[in-house]
């Protein structure tokens, strides 16, 4: 029989509405505010998240009257088709998001329905970008449960569990579900018997370096025997295989490790490299209600290594049901732990702890903290802490804990504050809570003179459970293909100051982004009729194309052209202004789209493997696997660069008007251009996959199938997919013209 913890209702009704805040140079200006028609049932534990809907960034959040709202981030207007209504069943879950449609950046929204006050109602729901239901899944309790429970107060974390985009969360019953995000089909090995209620959002990470996304889940636990397992009273922290109980003889099979504190684990765990020496670990609070006060671990923050072995425990001055944040609050490049507590009676505090030892660095009294703290770098080079409490929201200096700004005193908060890179390039903060009339209210501020580009920097914790997929993962790999699942926390728009960087693409359609270029989506997790073979980027750094043998998928501001007739495609190249592209087949046929012009094609003796435009765009070269270069339009062929066996790509030298060829072994030939070096002798398992020119043609980058990058001339390396635990080879590298 599941034990359902008490639901937390708005505890403080506040009078007075303060609408501007500043201190020590921080100026928060209200941009918009929306009152919700939910008097008496306002926003509770549901934190605002950011999604791309109708092509624009939008805030999504649920309330206890049974709605999921969506407001455009820039002006607060309602997104067409929203809100979604549950028919009156409360929503305490924080919406999570992921883009599911190839060629579209719009997100699907996932939410749990039902809470502790309505245990007999609820389930798992996916909402299309227009607010309609994509699928819903009802919880099925074990046959032995005489009083089944269906509510899902936890939030759904998004990741690649079994080779698809999946969502996972416990129910308030005794089952944890993992579901295919596209279809709503429950994954093999699930539901997984958790033995009691789950209120915590799981964290997702590749904890063991085996390329699999492990599930880190917390929950309550009742003493007794079930399915041959003897449970102790209190709670649990578990690491569960992404395959659940598949291939085992038990509904609890697939458990990789667990810890069993004597208090319920209703705090959502966070994972990252915060332990001594940068070792990965798990940190979590315990219960959120006073009924657990008698437990030894009540009021403690608990840290474990990835094998669930205790690393340290810190007793704090209040209940630790809020989710901890992992952030670089000192500016030293590592991760500290920040936790908000609830001491009752309107009082609470925020504690900053050393990640390696659990020693308290500072603490600051606040109102009751029920929702997780978040962080932002407002320009000082380290993360400040944004505290939501029943008394409003304020900002604490990350290094000292000193209060440096009060954002809002007119709204009580039991959810987390959302930090965004706003469309105007500043930092935005969104609060969702209840006002003095016990009505739900969503308020959006911007920070004068701030830089939104800082929001997603390493060491930041900008929202509940870290990111729009709610992975709770600060800096660990997330398993096969999961990293590209992360929807952009900022709009897919041209970077300020011009583009700088490059993209790597894999055969499965995953896209890895480096520099300041926009992350605009990928094909990771989608069913493809054939692998991705090529990639090209728009000129402004806010879009790109992925090509398969027969189709082209556009992302961001990349033009969507019907690739009619294209078949056997092996390579592509964008025009200089990014308003068109060429495709070439292995037989040498060339197709032109957008503002690209066709100058013909050829039929070499060996298969074509690449195409590159001439410096002025009035022609192009194709190259075969034997290194035979053919020129069309004004593209002139240099006889000095030919016959490179095993050629895999060609790139334009904009400085000289020539080109470079590269082979699978890393050799580079220059055709009428400058030579900057090669990486010959690449290992057979990681042959070179492609080449991209550096800015102004003064160098180039090579990438191998393992994701490793090699830079020559003025080309710089700012990261690669080498450490991403790839389960599909890198097939292309692309960069905006001039970047």
Image (cartoon, rainbow, N blue to C red):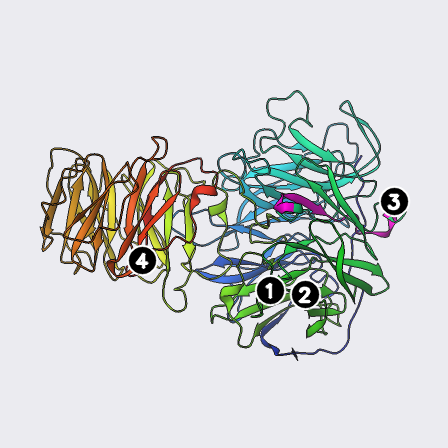
Q: 477 and 161: which one is in front? A: 477
Q: Which dot marks residue 714?
A: 4
Question: How far is the residue under mark 1 from the one under mark 3?
Answer: 36 Å
Image quarter where the N terminus lies is top right
How packed is label 1: few (under 14 Cα within 10 Å), some, or many (20 or more)?
A: many
Q: Classify residue 527 by image quadrant.
A: top left
Please tell me whether mark 4 sits on a helix, a strand or a loop.
loop
Residue denoted by label 1? 382
Q: Classify residue 556 by image quadrant.
A: bottom left
Residue 557 screen position, x and y as percent: 35, 59
Residue 319 screen position, x and y as percent: 81, 54
Please tell me whether mark 1 sits on a helix, a strand or a loop.
loop
Residue denoted by label 3? 295
Question: How far is the residue under mark 1 from the one under mark 2?
Answer: 8 Å
Residue 686 shown left or right of residue 182 in the figure: left
Residue 293 screen position, x and y as percent: 88, 49
User: Which mark is first along the chain, 2 or 3?
Assistant: 3
User: Which mark is first along the chain, 4 or 1?
Assistant: 1
How packed is label 3: few (under 14 Cα within 10 Å), some, or many (20 or more)?
A: some
Please tell me whether mark 2 sits on a helix, a strand or a loop.
loop
Residue denoted by label 2? 399
Of the two numbered discs 1 and 4 in the rendering, the one whose residue sits closer to the viewer: 4
Residue 369 seen by the camera: no
Q: Which residues are magenta?
A: 277-292
């Amino acid at each position: 029989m599941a034990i359902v913890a008490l639901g937390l209702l708005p505890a403080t009704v506040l009078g007075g509405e303060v609408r501007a805040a500043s201190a020590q140079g921080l100026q928060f200006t209200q941009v918009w505010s929306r009152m919700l028609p939910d008097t008496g049932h306002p926003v509770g534990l549901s934190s605002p998240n950011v999604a791309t809907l109708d092509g624009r960034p939008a805030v999504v959040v649920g309330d206890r009257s049974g709605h999921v709202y969506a407001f455009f981030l820039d002006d607060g207007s309602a997104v067409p088709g929203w809100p979604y209504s549950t028919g009156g069943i409360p929503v305490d879950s924080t919406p999570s998001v992921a883009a599911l449609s190839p060629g579209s950046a719009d997100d699907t929204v996932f939410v749990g329905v039902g809470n502790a006050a309505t245990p007999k109602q609820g389930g798992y729901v996916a909402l299309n970008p227009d607010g309609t239901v994509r699928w819903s899944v009802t919880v099925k309790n074990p046959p032995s449960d005489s009083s089944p429970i269906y509510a899902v107060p936890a939030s759904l974390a998004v990741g690649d569990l079994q080779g698809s985009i999946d969502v996972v969360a416990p129910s308030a019953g005794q089952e944890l579900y993992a579901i295919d995000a596209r279809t709503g089909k429950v994954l093999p090995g699930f539901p997984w018997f958790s033995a009691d209620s789950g209120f915590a959002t799981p964290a997702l990470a590749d904890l063991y370096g085996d390329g699999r996304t492990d599930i880190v889940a917390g929950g309550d636990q009742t003493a007794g025997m079930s399915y041959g397992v003897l449970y102790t009273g209190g709670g649990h922290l578990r690491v569960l295989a992404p395959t659940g109980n598949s291939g085992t003889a038990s509904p609890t099979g697939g458990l990789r490790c667990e810890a069993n504190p004597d208090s319920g684990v209703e705090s959502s765990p966070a994972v990252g490299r915060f332990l001594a020496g940068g070792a990965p670990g798990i940190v979590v609070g315990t219960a959120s209600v006073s009924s657990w006060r008698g437990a030894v671990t009540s009021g403690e923050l608990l840290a474990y290594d990835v094998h669930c072995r205790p690393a340290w425990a810190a007793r704090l001055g209040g209940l630790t049901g809020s989710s901890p944040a992992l952030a670089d609050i000192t500016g030293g490049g590592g991760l500290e732990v920040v936790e908000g507590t609830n001491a009752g009676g309107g009082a609470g505090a925020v504690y900053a702890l050393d990640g390696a030892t659990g020693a308290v660095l500072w603490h600051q009294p606040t109102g009751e903290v029920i929702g997780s703290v978040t962080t932002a770098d407002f320009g000082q080079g380290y993360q400040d802490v944004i505290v939501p409490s029943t008394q409003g929201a304020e900002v604490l200096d990350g290094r000292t804990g000193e209060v440096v700004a009060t954002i809002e005193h007119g709204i009580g908060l039991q959810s987390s504050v959302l930090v965004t890179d706003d469309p105007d390039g500043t930092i935005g903060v969104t609060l969702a809570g209840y006002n003095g009339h016990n009505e739900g209210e969503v308020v959006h501020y911007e920070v004068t003179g701030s830089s939104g580009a800082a929001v997603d920097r390493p060491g930041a914790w900008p929202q509940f459970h870290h990111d729009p997929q709610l992975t709770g993962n600060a800096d660990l790999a997330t398993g096969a293909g999961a990293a590209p699942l992360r929807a952009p926390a900022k709009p897919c728009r041209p970077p300020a100051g011009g583009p700088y960087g490059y993209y790597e693409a894999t055969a499965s359609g995953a896209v890895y982004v480096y520099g300041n270029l926009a992350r605009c989506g990928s094909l990771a997790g989608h069913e493809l009729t054939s692998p991705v073979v090529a990639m090209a980027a728009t000129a402004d750094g806010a879009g790109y194309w992925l090509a398969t043998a027969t189709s082209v998928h556009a992302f961001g501001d990349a033009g969507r052209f019907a690739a009619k007739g294209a078949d056997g495609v092996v390579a592509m190249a964008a025009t200089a202004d990014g308003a068109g592209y060429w495709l070439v087949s292995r037989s040498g046929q060339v197709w032109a789209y957008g503002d690209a012009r066709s100058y013909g094609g050829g039929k070499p003796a060996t298969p074509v493997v690449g195409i590159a435009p001439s410096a002025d765009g009035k022609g192009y070269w194709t190259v075969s696997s034997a290194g035979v270069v053919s020129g069309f339009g004004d593209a002139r062929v240099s006889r000095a660069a030919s016959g490179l066996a095993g050629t895999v790509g060609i790139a334009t030298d904009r400085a000289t008007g020539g080109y470079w060829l590269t082979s699978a072994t890393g050799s580079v030939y220059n055709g009428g251009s400058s030579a900057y070096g090669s990486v010959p002798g690449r290992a057979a398992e990681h042959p070179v996959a492609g080449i991209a020119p550096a800015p102004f043609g003064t160098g180039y980058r090579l990438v191998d199938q393992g994701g490793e990058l090699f830079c020559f001339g003025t080309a710089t390396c700012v990261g690669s997919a080498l450490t991403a635990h790839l389960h599909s080879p890198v097939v292309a590298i692309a960069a905006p013209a001039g970047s």
